[in-house]
Image (spheres, rainbow, N blue to C red):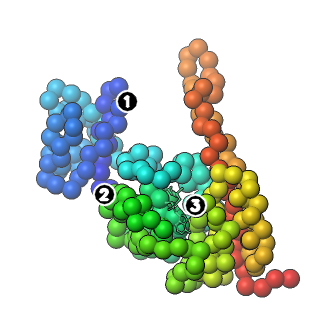
Amino acid sequence: MPGFLILLDPHGRRHAVALDGVTAKVPGLGTFDVARLRASVGRKLSVGGRSFLVLEPTPQDYRAALDREAQTLAPKDLASLLFESDVVPGARVLEAGAGSGALTVALARHVGPGGRVVSYDLREDFLAVARRNVERLGLADRVELRLGDVRAGVPEKDLDAVLLDLPDPWAAVPAAWDALRACGALATFSPNMEQVKETVGAIRGRPFVDLRTVELIEREMEVRDVGVRPSFAALGHTGYLTFARKVLDTF
Ligand SMILES: C[S@@+](CC[C@H](N)C(=O)[O-])C[C@H]1O[C@@H](n2cnc3c(N)ncnc32)[C@H](O)[C@@H]1O
């Protein structure tokens, strides 16, 4: 059972309810009995004359529940980072920087209780926000948040994946290569093409294979009786994703 549930009201509004006590107070809605909430997953619950559907949180709900300081990654980019880096249950992964912890939380959910996420950031204030988010979402058992500059190298070794979302990922490529196991995955996210060029140059300077860069375009569709068309509220540019895998030899 996740650390929180969602109450969906008839108007489509979603209210997050933490499950860490006997009762849970939700501003504007009232106080709920946590055992009753847990027993009502997937069902309608009526409280004080109002009805809700009780839902398990989706990945979007986890992201929406974050306190934010730094810019967070969009769901389309998070999904691709997890897939391309092959982040599976039990994996040991490193990321930098932690920022608000959107990627930290996604990684922690995918590696599961048997995996490990080490997340670095240069700034204690960002680490505090990420720590608060990770703890509130019940994922602290598998996450280690560390103050440090990942470009200077890290003590972690034989990692399954290293994911970099920082202004100069190219400067951390040597440290990433050292920390990865053979065939471990490197992934970087950068908003600008100039950053991609520098990063790809640094990756080409080391034994890596399967190097490629993509940009993901997402268009939400509005399915209406009067016509189906893309939403006017399109998600604009987010960034470019670069992937590679470490090898030990070159031709
Ligand atoms: C855009 S934010 C990361 C957002 C995060 N991926 C998320 O989705 O919430 C970039 C972060 O990288 C951190 N950072 C920048 N350079 C760094 C470095 N060399 N080592 C560790 N962290 C760094 C910054 O302090 C900032 O918090």
In the rendered structure, the answer to whether residue 108 lies left or right of residue 8 reads right
Which numbered circle lies on residue 136? Answer: 2
**Residue 170, horizontal then vertical, whole percent:** 68, 68
Residue position for label 3: 165
Residue nearest the viewer, comparing 196 with 233: 196
Spatial CA span between label 2 and label 3: 23 Å
Give the mark, 1 or 2, whose residue is nearer the N terminus: 1
Q: Quadrant of the N terminus?
A: bottom left
- The kind of residue tagged 3 is Asp
Labels 3, 1: front one: 3
Asked whether the beta carbons under mark 2 and mark 3 sit within 8 Å of each other, the answer is no
Spatial CA span between label 3 and label 1: 33 Å
**Residue 58, horizontal then vertical, whole percent:** 42, 47
Q: Quadrant of the C terminus?
A: bottom right
**Residue 2, horizontal then vertical, whole percent:** 32, 56
Residue nearest the viewer, comparing 147 with 76: 147
Residue position for label 1: 12
In the rendered structure, the answer to whether residue 166 lies left or right of residue 209 reads left
Mark 2: few/some/many CA within 10 Å (<14, 14-19, 20+):
some
Residue nearest the viewer, comparing 170 with 29: 170
Looking at the rendered structure, the secondary structure element under dot 2 is helix
Residue nearest the viewer, comparing 238 with 63: 238
